[in-house]
């Protein structure tokens, strides 16, 4: 005879996993803000920029943003060259190192 399933413990485990995933996502979003140098912006301005991005319906603009973001995460030489050694360039490099470290841990 088969052992009955403990649905309560399974649901509890799933809830805990969902909570951990949400916490990790929030932490990664915070790390992204810091890595891009956006932590230097006033909170209101950062919120406004994000709201404008969400409300934008222009596919070409969104595609440009996507490409720029992909370049940031790839850490291409071209992006580093454009940064020219300013604070954001250093932050981008640090962010890429953090991203690589996170992937290695996963």
Image (spheres, helix red, strand yellow):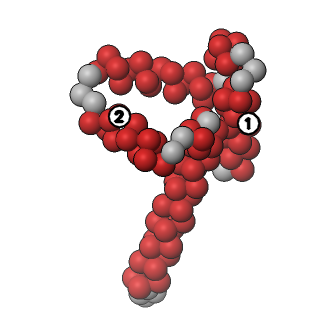
Task: Indicate which disc, 1 or 2, sits on the residue closer to the N terminus.
Answer: 2
Q: Nearer the viewer, residue 22 or 78?
A: 78
Residue at the disc numbered 1? 94
**Quadrant position of residue 100:** top right
Q: Nearer the viewer, residue 32 or 44?
A: 44
Say which residue appears at 49% left-offset and 68% top-offset: 19
Residue at the disc numbered 2? 53
Residue 45 location, x and y as percent?
44, 41
Say which residue appears at 46% left-offset and 80% top-offset: 12
In this view of the protein, can residue 2 be seen by the observer? Answer: no
Residue 90 is left or right of residue 63, and the answer is: right
In this view of the protein, can residue 97 be seen by the observer? Answer: yes
Give the mark count: 2
Q: How far is mark 1 from mark 2, CA to CA?
A: 25 Å
Would you call the spot at circle 2 few (<14 residues within 10 Å), some (14-19), or many (20 or more)? some
**Quadrant position of residue 51:** top left
Say which residue appears at 67% left-offset and 19% top-offset: 83
Residue 34 location, x and y as percent?
62, 43
SS for dot 1: helix
Residue 33 is left or right of residue 2, and the answer is: right
Residue 74 is left or right of residue 43, and the answer is: right
Residue 53 location, x and y as percent?
35, 34
Would you call the spot at circle 1 few (<14 residues within 10 Å), some (14-19), or many (20 or more)? some
Report the quarter where the N terminus lies: bottom left
Q: Nearer the viewer, residue 106 or 101?
A: 101
SS for dot 2: helix
Say which residue appears at 52% left-offset and 54% top-offset: 25
């Amino acid at each position: 005879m088969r052992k009955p399933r403990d649905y309560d413990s399974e649901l509890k485990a799933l809830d805990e996993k969902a909570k951990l995933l949400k916490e990790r996502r929030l932490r990664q979003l915070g790390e992204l803000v810091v890595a891009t140098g956006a932590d230097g912006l006033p909170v209101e301005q950062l919120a406004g920029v994000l709201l404008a991005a969400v409300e934008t319906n222009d596919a070409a603009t969104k595609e440009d943003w996507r490409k720029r973001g992909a370049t940031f995460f790839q850490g291409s030489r071209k992006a580093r060259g454009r940064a020219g050694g300013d604070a954001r360039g250093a932050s981008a490099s640090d962010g890429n190192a953090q991203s690589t470290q996170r992937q290695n841990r996963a």
